Amino acid sequence: MSEFPPVPLTLEGSSVLHQFFRFDWKALRAVNSLDERKEITEEFTKVFAGFEKAADGKSQSAIFSQLGHKGDLIFIHFRDSLEALNQVELTLAQTRLHDFLVPTHSYVSVVELGLYESTRKTYEAAAAKGLTQHSPEWNAEIAASLERGAAAMTPRLFPSVPDAKYLCFYPMDRKRDEQKNWYMVPFTDRQRMMHDHGMIGRRYAEQVRQIITGSIGMDDWEWGVTLFAEDPVVFKKLIYEMRFDEVSAEYALFGQFFIGLRLQLDKVSGWLEGKL
Amino acid sequence: MSEFPPVPLTLEGSSVLHQFFRFDWKALRAVNSLDERKEITEEFTKVFAGFEKAADGKSQSAIFSQLGHKGDLIFIHFRDSLEALNQVELTLAQTRLHDFLVPTHSYVSVVELGLYESTRKTYEAAAAKGLTQHSPEWNAEIAASLERGAAAMTPRLFPSVPDAKYLCFYPMDRKRDEQKNWYMVPFTDRQRMMHDHGMIGRRYAEQVRQIITGSIGMDDWEWGVTLFAEDPVVFKKLIYEMRFDEVSAEYALFGQFFIGLRLQLDKVSGWLEGKL
Amino acid sequence: MSEFPPVPLTLEGSSVLHQFFRFDWKALRAVNSLDERKEITEEFTKVFAGFEKAADGKSQSAIFSQLGHKGDLIFIHFRDSLEALNQVELTLAQTRLHDFLVPTHSYVSVVELGLYESTRKTYEAAAAKGLTQHSPEWNAEIAASLERGAAAMTPRLFPSVPDAKYLCFYPMDRKRDEQKNWYMVPFTDRQRMMHDHGMIGRRYAEQVRQIITGSIGMDDWEWGVTLFAEDPVVFKKLIYEMRFDEVSAEYALFGQFFIGLRLQLDKVSGWLEGKL
Amino acid sequence: MSEFPPVPLTLEGSSVLHQFFRFDWKALRAVNSLDERKEITEEFTKVFAGFEKAADGKSQSAIFSQLGHKGDLIFIHFRDSLEALNQVELTLAQTRLHDFLVPTHSYVSVVELGLYESTRKTYEAAAAKGLTQHSPEWNAEIAASLERGAAAMTPRLFPSVPDAKYLCFYPMDRKRDEQKNWYMVPFTDRQRMMHDHGMIGRRYAEQVRQIITGSIGMDDWEWGVTLFAEDPVVFKKLIYEMRFDEVSAEYALFGQFFIGLRLQLDKVSGWLEGKL
Amino acid sequence: MSEFPPVPLTLEGSSVLHQFFRFDWKALRAVNSLDERKEITEEFTKVFAGFEKAADGKSQSAIFSQLGHKGDLIFIHFRDSLEALNQVELTLAQTRLHDFLVPTHSYVSVVELGLYESTRKTYEAAAAKGLTQHSPEWNAEIAASLERGAAAMTPRLFPSVPDAKYLCFYPMDRKRDEQKNWYMVPFTDRQRMMHDHGMIGRRYAEQVRQIITGSIGMDDWEWGVTLFAEDPVVFKKLIYEMRFDEVSAEYALFGQFFIGLRLQLDKVSGWLEGKL
């Protein structure tokens, strides 16, 4: 048995749901009564306002106007459990506006902090104490370390929706190809590559806010990446630069990319009339 | 000819159907009469209650509220034959609620216990007796061994639906790539890898209940994995840890992932009004 | 030029069409009049009875109730030409029941006997006579051999629909990967692998009836495999065992799997009321 | 710089559009008036007759009754430009019959003659004259050669729709894999493989008429292959034999296969009543 | 650390949206009133005229009549931001004509000039000055160089829609395979290959106008290629020739291809009556 397990420790925070909808403009046009339209909008606005200012303080929801045929509206929701997210879906489904929303995509995940650096220290400390891997003592050591980490990182584990103009979302996997297989790479090599990768992100820290969510067992890819920026060209610059980085160049597998513009709740009624 | 055949013995139990549906909220909203809604719900509830308490004692059905756009409701059914499962489908199709269910996915399989360890013993015992492979005597020896196994494992072959809050389902294959080809790996190597893999699962035994179903010849993947847990983050931890294990890292091919929350039958009428 | 051409000879028999439909239960529920329902059923039954007892004696059609969301009904038709199969499609399309059938899949192929063993003998005999490949004399020699084969194998070339409870269908290709390329493997190696493969099938002969159809130039895969058995678990056992066999392990590429239960024509009206 | 460019010269002829439609039988059944049906058929027949006998003499259109769920009708159109093909689409879209046609697939391409053999001669002649590649003189030499070729091959560049019972269509690419990459193979090796490939086709020349169309920059595959024969089993025999040929075995990538029966225009009204 | 970063510098110009729609001819046929049709057309024409002659001088929109089943109409829009493009989508969605447009595809990107040659010079100059990579001084040096480039290239960064008869669009990636991985190729090799690639394009410069747009982080592929020419066969010749070029042969991955004919705004009302 090697010095420590191959799996890096992770911390989990908010449960997150990304919803993507095409808007049925034809059906809305068929609603002739202005009063009826107003009722539809007001009901939705009231419901969504509740999402934005949930009682627990940690819950967050936001709306984006999406570009391209993959959808017209993106909703993102941060909650304290998948159960709470499912309730969000059911609550939205009861609004009349929902009749005009055709679901095109979604993503279920939880905020995740991958801890390559501290995992190594934690595993080494446990090994130094002579603890047997997966023994109750070893488990307790690891759990205590994670707890300390979670306490220190609460704001990153339960983030607010950044107040930026543009959003970019894409899911990704680590490759498990015949020769390039991330899950067969030694821990320390993975740690080094993740470190180098992080250095690029750090150079963009002032221009891009990034939220990484883990989705193994919850959705079809391993991770979701949600980026926020004032200038969408920065998304391109950042991801292009990262693509030359070893961990992305050799081991990243990307899904579809989704892009949208923040739509404040009080602008929704304007949006329904075609005004961004 | 090698000492014993390359194929591990398996035991089969319940036939299983996973059904995934999107719910047509718009159509339900068009049903204005409260009485009509009530009739629809009561008819469905009565039918499904029959599914849950079938006369044979082994039949089981359960409902889950699904997250994301892949569907809104998951039904899982355990029966004693594919024929009985087909009857379940036909019976559901006659309910009025079925008009609001848009099928998005399904999975047809049977509970399977893969017996790498005991297969080896059985094959070795038959070889020790000097029996020719696939001769009537050899066949009888194998059949007797399987029968003893089936008797001992009845509860695992005909499982109840575990009483947990969350469900995770995904199908999987073993890879048959040019260099990494599970079906060309010697039996004993496969046996060793499966053993190591099982050790990880065992560490999660208290947190996750797992039902493996085989679907070769029945559906598009080789196996289905259905997990049950109180905390969905445990699904992520378990599958992530397994992904570094040799058999998964090198030989596993995963399909889509589906996740839902148990919905007790008496909560269905609430769910139809948007309450989880 | 090698001793003989790389392509094995084949014999072709019945033209075969597999049709897969989802049934529109909602639309049927909208047909309130019992008389109308009866008319719909009787018209269909009469038409399909004609399919089952066609004048030429060789034509065969059968209905299966399908499991899962991929469809609800499977029709298979054996005819003496693709033209006759196209007429079947057009005739079905004129029935009122067809309004409730949503096509989800199909497969167009012809019964094919691949003759690796006898091809070798035929090619060797022609070479022994000193005939030049593809010369008129060589062609005549091959054609005569095929004619003798066709006469001897008529029942297998124009099979009846086996009278079994379950059907399993899947299409498949031989791989043409960079290193594992069936079409670059020497004839004698392919012959040996096909022989070994056949040995497995033979052990299941009493439990499974198999019809191989060729579809190169007719549909998206190279072959279709249609299996018939009383117990669907036998499909799984057979295909799993074959998957460890060299020709399948290294060179088989599988499409989707479809499974159904035989539905006798006099049970169709019951099926439309939800009774299997 | 090598002796001559790697790209083989090509000659282009007719622009070709393949259209595939599913027929909405349910909607046609809803047209109760026989007069209305007759009007629909007559309008379509008149329009399509114009397509078949276009003023320029080179234009050709034909109808096929398709097998399987991929569609019910195939139209193929040969014209002198993509513009003329687009006008065909628009003209068809104005007919009332078009309301019953659900587009399922299409293919846009131009008749292409790949000139591996003569390209070599042309390039060698230009090199022998000491012309610099891509210089005005070299370009003129090549252009003159192509012009002579086009004049000689007019009937093959502007073909008539062969008068055969069955049609088979499939698109294809040349592989660009890591090791097997057609576009990295030296010209002379490609020339040799294409020559061998052509020899197989020649043996089938009496049974199969073949039209190769190029679609790089026009549709999703590099080439379309349209075959015509009296017996559809010949498609299978030809393509199966070719699949063992080096250029297909190693470098061909195939798309979907479509198959249909020629439907003469005066049989369309019968077809609409279910008679082939 | 190597002499300079692996990522080439890029300049970005107009934001671009490609929209692809199928036209619902059946629904239009249901609009019986000629006045109503006229109103629909006039409203659309007025809105689109505003797109074509936007106040800022840089905005451009154009319409193309598409070939094949992938769509009937293509709109392309050049704007100064993604926000402006999203407003275009919303404005179009308010027109009555939009009810007849079924979105089938789209592409979101920005005009991009990849600067392999000047990047090398810029990086070398910065290195010669002894500047540390990514230091404020180094960043300033790079930014100044980019600014000079942008000023010189304004017409290419904010292009007009070329006045050609045909359009061809396709997205593409650079391969990241196990052995052929563009993002692991040394900068100077990539620079050389891009240079050779450009030489082919230059030979076609009089026949084809090309606009390259970058879409990393904005859409599912890395780049979009939009070509304009009077003769669509030139698209085929150009792309075929490029396919033998090292960078395309080994490293290009292509998406779908879309082709259409320019449709001037004053021809739209004719097009709606089936006249190109």
Image (tube, coloured by chain):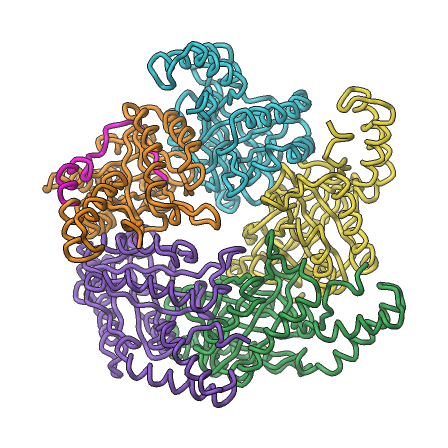
Chain colours: A cyan, B orange, C purple, D green, E yellow
Say which of D261 and E74 sits in front. D261
Q: Is residue B215 visible?
A: yes
Q: Picture quarter containing residue D211?
A: bottom right
Q: Name above or below for residue C249 compared with residue E273.
A: above
Asked if residue C143 is among those painted magenta in the image, a careful observer would answer no
Q: In the displayed structure, does residue A255 sit left or right of residue B161?
A: right
Residue B202 spot, x, y in % from top left: 30, 27
Range of the magenta residues? Answer: B146-170
Residue C142 spot, x, y in % from top left: 42, 84
Say which of C44 and A272 sits in front. C44
Residue D243 spot, x, y in % from top left: 51, 68
Residue E202 spot, x, y in % from top left: 82, 55
Q: Name above or below for residue C153 compared with residue E41.
A: below
Single out the residue that lies furthest toward the left: B55
Q: In the displayed structure, does residue D153 sit left or right of residue C180?
A: right
Asked if residue B168 is among those painted magenta in the image, a careful observer would answer yes
Q: Name above or below for residue C240 compared with residue A36.
A: below
Query: What residue do we see at 60% from left, 76% from top?
Result: D198
How many marks do you count on the picture? 0
Say which of A269 and E206 sits in front. E206
Which corner quadrant holds the C terminus of chain B?
top left
Which corner quadrant holds the N terminus of chain B?
bottom left
Q: Is residue E272 visible?
A: no
Q: In the displayed structure, does residue C227 sit left or right of residue A72?
A: left
Q: Name above or below for residue E51 compared with residue C263.
A: above
